[in-house]
Every structure is written in C-alpha cells, then in structure tokens.
Image (cartoon, rainbow, N blue to C red):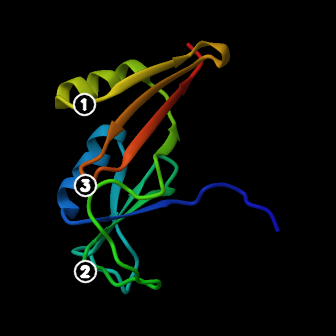
Amino acid sequence: MHVEALDHVNIITADLETSCAYYAHLLGLERRDGPPPLTAQTAQWMHDQTGRAIFHLNSLDCPRAYNREVESGPTGSIHHIALRCQGYDAMIARLDGRGADYAVNLVDAIGLRQIFTEDPNGVLLELNFFGG
C-alpha cells in the first residue's frame, strides 16, 4: 500500500452558495453536484480543469458517512491547505479585485512564491507558485 496523492478536502459550510462562488471565482474551479444520495442543496464538488474534485463543499445538514461535531471558524488542528498553482500575477489581481486579505511570502532558495488567504469559512489556503 502507498499513498498516490491527496484526493480532496471536505469543507462543511453554513453558506454553501458563498463558498462555491468563492472557489469558482478565485481558483477557477468548476462547480458540480455531489453524487447521490447527496443533493445539489447539500453538497457541491469543486473540480479542477482535469475533472478532479479538489474540494467537497457540504452544507451543515448534509448527510455524512462519518458524522462528528462541526464548528464554524478556524479549522482546529489543520493550519492550512496548500495548493500548487500557476498564474501568480492573475491570482494577485483576482484577490485585489475581491478586496481580499492576503499575505505574500517568498522562499527564494527554492524559487517559491506563496500567497496565504482565507476562504469564507476561515479555512487558510496556501497558494504555491514555483518558478518565476
């Protein structure tokens, strides 16, 4: 057995519409309904350009195979989710266009530019841009 890749991140949200719009606009992800028994009102999956569901966005009342208490706000033991991205300048423009708060970090030793920003649920995103 070995891990091939991170499959997806599941975010429970009190505002499914706002969360979907955020990930669609900021990251260019495509919104699709989750599979049955999930419904369009309780679950939306945000897909990348290759069709992979990167984020599963679920409403508070969405049925779950493993149910546990969910609290809004900062994400407990998980500090952030890191995504490898392309298009640094376009991302800065999108964030500025939204009036979003973000921080930039440069790691010159490995040619990495990072942008840190929070989604509407308080989930911290680390957007990594390698090279250039």
Q: What element carries label 3?
A: helix
Residue nearer the viewer, 7 or 11 = 11
Asked whether disc 1 touches disc 3, contact meaning CB atoms under 8 Å apart, the reply is no
For disc 3, the marked residue is 19
Question: 42 left or right of 83?
Answer: left
1 vs 3, front mark: 1
Q: State whether residue 93 is above or below residue 50.
A: above
Which residue occupies 50% across, 33% down? 85
For disc 2, the marked residue is 61
Instruction: Kindly identify which numbered label has been placed on residue 101.
Output: 1
**Real-space CA distance between mark 3 and mark 2, rounded to the nearest whole angstrom:** 15 Å
Residue nearer the viewer, 61 or 97 = 61
Q: State whether residue 73 is above or below residue 127.
A: below
Question: 25 left or right of 123?
Answer: left
Q: State whether residue 118 is above or below residue 64.
A: above
Where is residue 100 drawn, in percent x and y?
22, 32
Q: State whether residue 17 is above or below residue 67.
A: above
- Which of the 4 image quarters holds residue 28? top left
Identify the amino acid type marked 3.
Ser
Identify the amino acid type marked 1.
Asp
Q: Decide which of tag 1 and tag 3 comes sooner along the chain.
A: 3
Which residue occupies 34% across, 81% down? 38
Q: Is mark 1 on a helix, strand or loop?
A: loop
Identify the amino acid type marked 2.
Asp
